[in-house]
Image (cartoon, rainbow, N blue to C red):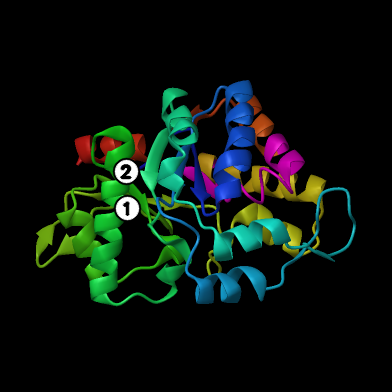
Amino acid sequence: MKLKDCFALRADIDSLKGLTVGSKNVLKLLEKNDLKASFYSAMGWEGDLINVLKHRVLRKKKIALPGKEKLVGLKPDYAELLRMLFKPKAFYLHEKELKKIRNEGHELGVHGFIHVKWNALNDEELRKEFVLMTQAFEKVFNEKPESLSTPFEFNNGTVIELVEKFGFKCRSYVGERIFQPIIKGRQARHVMVPVTINKSKSFQPIIEYYLSKGLGKEKTANKITELIEEKVNEERLASFYIHPEFEAIHALPVLEKVLNNVKELGLRSMTFEEVAEKYRKRE
């Protein structure tokens, strides 16, 4: 399906700081530039003790932060890490922040229940995650979620079947095509909507990717703008994704410049659900 002059932004909320601080910054930039976005939030918390230690504490990031010319270590927020480890708080209890996203006209979908557990879930654990994240969403909004992005782009046959079983209309993934998957010989109801601006062998957000290569903030923003224009010229969806706890806090000037450029290009801002609905009607 061709999409003329269409842009979509996905924001995966992986941490409580991303929800309470980063998302507010994203919302301000979106309002300033009259753009929409699709937010996908974990509904439970960051993870259990072992996985938080493994993926949040022991993993070191090297990044070219805005204003710095060389790669530097991104220092851990130790207070936040201690909270994750010993005093986790469920994201769905932050109703004010979650409702603010929808009240300002943006899409809000789900992004797992316990986020970092999605590195390797068996079928039974997957079913439990789907139950918990949909129930938590219903507690806040009194309705079922309709859109999903899976943590770490986790995917297998069970995920595809559960997306369909739980009635999701849209699933965001890193790729190129907009399509409806085939499940046991039948076309699924849900639509797969891609994040098209990515590195084919990396699920790392594109801003974080280029900064980690030492490109610098100005060149990173310009490079991403070029990639957006390439997709637009091909009449394909131009979309990328961010983590509010990084791009909207540590790399805010880069995100701001890219969104300013999107506005100047005059692109039509769409949510991932809107793209899915447009595809469904056309098919």
- Gap between marks 2 and 1, in whole Å? 6 Å
Residue sitting at x 58%, y 47%: 18
Q: Do the residues labelled 2 and 1 touch (CB within 8 Å)?
A: yes
Does residue 211 appear to the left or right of 273 in the view shown?
right
Is 238 in the magenta?
yes
Q: Which residue lies furthest to the front in this view?
A: 86
Image position, residue 259 (x, y; %): 64, 34
| Image: 7 above or below 124 | above
Q: Circle 2 sits in a helix, a strand or a loop, which is it?
A: helix
State which quarter of the image contains the N terminus. Answer: top left
| Stretch in magenta | 233-257
Q: Dot 1: what SS?
A: helix
Residue at point 15%, 56% (across, down): 165
Q: Is residue 13 above or below residue 184?
A: above
Relative vertical location of residue 241 with respect to residue 88 in this rendering, above or below: above
What is the number of the mark on residue 137? 2
131 sits left or right of 194 in the view:
left
Vertical comparison of 83 with 202: above or below: above
- Residue occupying the point 53% across, 29% down: 267
- Residue 198, labelled with which disc? none
Query: Nearest the camera: 197 or 113?
Result: 113
Q: Position of residue 119 (x, y in %)?
A: 44, 73
**Which numbered circle lies on residue 133?**
1
Is residue 145 something one can see in this rendering?
Answer: no
Q: Is residue 211 visible?
A: yes
